[in-house]
Amino acid sequence: MRRPIARAVTGALGLVSAAAAALVAPATATADRVIVGGEPVEVADTPWVVALSSRDRFGGMRAGQFCGGVVVAPTKVLTAAHCLSSDVLGGAPEDVTDLAVIAGRTALTGQGGQEVGVAGTWINPAYEPATNAGDLAVLTLKSALPSSYVLATAGPGDTAYTPGTTASVYGWGDTTGNGTYATSLRAARVQVLEDAACERAYPGNAKGDYQAATMLCAGDPQGGRDACQGDSGGPLVAMGRLIGLVSWGSGCGEAANPGVYTRVSAVLPDPLPVSASRS
């Protein structure tokens, strides 16, 4: 069964699971094993990477981190739509009173940076939970981040999408595929792959249905580099531009099962949408 890769709550509040039972099954959904095969990076060098947080839902051990995100305007953060689902949050986004992004902080429980509350959320109305097509959401922040945090997005036809292009995926996710999460930001270098690679891996069977119109395929042809649980919504960056968001896959770092990302150029509205206000 196709599985997205976010962390999920096990009850109404507070307790964290490495992911819901489906996410820890043998074919765990994917994109970073703490960013599988990755290495530590400093947020100072990649200020556009942020962590989505709710201590109320996920506890304080990892400062409430459950997904990743990327700053595309001083008050706008992109993430995966499935990160805001009831399966992950245990309820509607508007019911998570302490929903915030952690920006400018490499170690989740470290010092520095800022935690900025979320004023509103927008989930792509074309998002299809059954296939994860159009897996995009936009968060509007209560206060603006520095303009230096903003990452440019690639548009349709951008050369950054060319197969063979080197890209990097970022996150604080699972380092083993078994619920061992990182507390400091990591990144892995992968390649943009031909759509055919993901179409072979996910032909619409039990492992998933790759749809090139709104999805992007990336990984390491030899395996060992990928994303995993907890990295959902985090950025895939090539040539200094945002090309994808961690979305789903099968396993972590498996050569035959590349990571699947939201194709940002295909689903990001222009202008950025006005988010529904939170109470």
Image (cartoon, grey):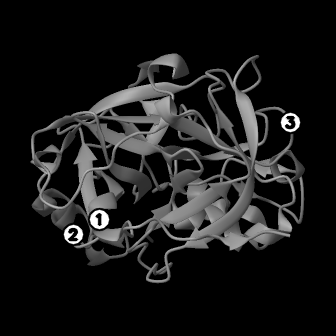
Residue positioned 61% across, 37% down in the render: 145
Q: Is residue 110 left or right of residue 261?
A: right
Instruction: Using the image, determine if residue 124 lies above or below residue 139.
Output: below
Q: How many residues crowd mark 1 within 10 Å: few (<14), some (14–19), many (20+)?
A: many
The residue at 56%/73% (across/down) is 123
Can residue 216 be seen here? The reply is: yes
Residue 28, given in percent of the width and then of the height, sits at 49, 54
Comparing 93 with 253, the one in front is 93
- Tell me the distance, in whole angstroms, between the alpha carbons under discs 1 and 2: 5 Å
Residue 60's tag is 3
Which element type, helix, strand or loop, lies under badge 3? loop
Nearest to N terminus: mark 3 or mark 1: 3
**Mark 1 vs 2: CB contact within 8 A:** yes
Q: Position of residue 42 (x, y in %)?
A: 51, 17
Residue 48 in sight: no
Helix, strand or loop status at disc 2: loop
Asked whether disc 3 touches disc 1, contact meaning CB atoms under 8 Å apart, the reply is no
Residue behind mark 2: 212
Task: Please identify the quarter of the rendering in which residue 200 is found.
Answer: bottom left
State how far apart marks 3 and 1 are (Cα): 33 Å
Which residue type does callout 2 highlight?
Answer: Ala
Q: Residue 38: horizontal and vertical position, in percent?
A: 40, 24
Please tell me in which quadrant of the rendered image residue 46 appears. Answer: top left
Residues marked 3 and 2 touching at CB (< 8 Å):
no
Please report whichever mark, 3 or 2, sits nearer to the chain's N-terminal start.
3
The amino acid type, in three-letter code, at marker 1 is Met
Distance between the Cα atoms at labels 3 and 2?
Answer: 38 Å
